[in-house]
Amino acid sequence: MTQIDRLFNEIDPDSGTFSFDENVARVFDDMISRSVPLYADVQRSIPMLAGLLEHDPIRVFDLGCSTGTSLIHLSAMLPDRNLELIGVDNSQPMLDQCQQKLDSLELPHRIETICDSVQSYNFENASIVLMNYTLQFVPESDRPALLRRISDSIRPGGFLLISEKVAHEQPAMDDAVVELYFEYKRRQGYSELEISRKRDALENVLVPLTTGQNLQLIHDAGFAKAEVLLKWFNFATFLCRI
C-alpha cells in the first residue's frame, strides 16, 4: 500500500529520468496529494459534475488513472448511479497499486483497469473522460490527435476534465510562480534536496503548456466550450464540452 513520499531523499536520478515505476507507485498517493495544489478539490468536483449528467449508464474513461483515486471516489460518492468505470494507464506498477486499493474496498461498481498508452487505447461512447495530470506527460506532437479522438468519442452532454501543470508566457512571471510552488512544497514537508532532485528528474519528461495554449488545443480538437474550472498559480483544471 501507499507509503510516505521520501523518494527523492533516497534516490538521485539523472535529469529527465522520472518514470512511473515501482518506486513511484508505492508512494504516489502521498506524492500527488502533497505536491499538487487543489488536488482534493479536483477529486471532489468529479462526482459532483458526473452527478449532473442524465446519461444511463454514465461511462467514464480515466486516461492516466494511476492508482484509481478518481474512479474509486466516483463509485463511492455515486452508489445509486449506473456507472461504467474504466481506467487506462501505461504503468503496470501503478495499476498494481490500484488493484491493491480495490481489493481492500467494497465498492458498488466494478472498476476495469487496462494497461495501455492513452495514445493507442481505443475508447468510444464516453460520458466522461478524465485526464488529470496526464496530458503533460504525452509528447506535444501527440496531444492534438489524442484530444480529437476524445472529442469524437464523447456523447452529447458529456464532458472532458483536464488537470495540468501550466507554464506562463513571460519568463519572469514563470520564475516567480515556480518559486511560489516550491514554497508550497516546503510547507508540505519536502526538503530542498527533494524539490531539486524531482525538478531535475522531470525535466523534459513533464512538458507544460500555457493556459492559452491548452485552451487552443482543446478548441482545435472540436470542443466548443472550455473553461478554467480551477487554477492555483501553475496548476489548472479545464472543463471541456462539445
Image: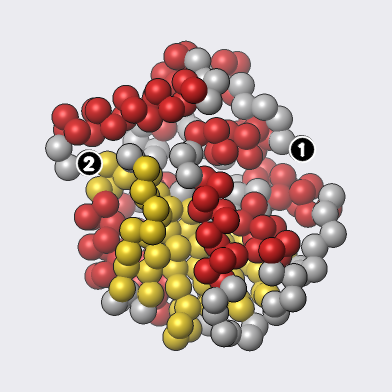
> Pointer 1 and pointer 2: residues touching (CB < 8 Å)?
no
Graded by Cα atoms within 10 Å as few (under 14), some (14 to 19) or many (20 or more), the crowding at tag 2 reads many
Quadrant showing the N terminus? top right
Q: Residue 91 in the image: state x and y as whole percent.
A: 60, 47
Graded by Cα atoms within 10 Å as few (under 14), some (14 to 19) or many (20 or more), the crowding at tag 1 reads few
Q: Which of marks 1 and 2 is in front?
A: 2
Q: Is 142 rendered above or below residue 5? A: below
Q: Which of 157 and 52 is in front in this view?
A: 52
Q: Residue 220 in the image: state x and y as whole percent.
A: 25, 70
Circle 1 residue: 1
Locate residue 9 relative to residue 13 in the image: left or right: right
Give the label on residue 168, or none. Answer: 2
Query: At label 1, which amino acid type do we have?
Result: Met
Locate residue 39 relative to residue 85 in the image: left or right: left
Q: Is 80 rendered above or below residue 67? A: below
Query: At label 2, which amino acid type do we have?
Result: His
Q: Residue 208 in the image: state x and y as whole percent.
A: 32, 44
Locate residue 117 relative to residue 206 in the image: left or right: right
Q: Which residue is drawn at 51% across and 62% down?
A: 130
Of pointers 1 and 2, the one earlier in the residue sequence: 1
Tell me where residue 160 sits by quadrant: bottom left
| SS at mark 1 in the image | loop
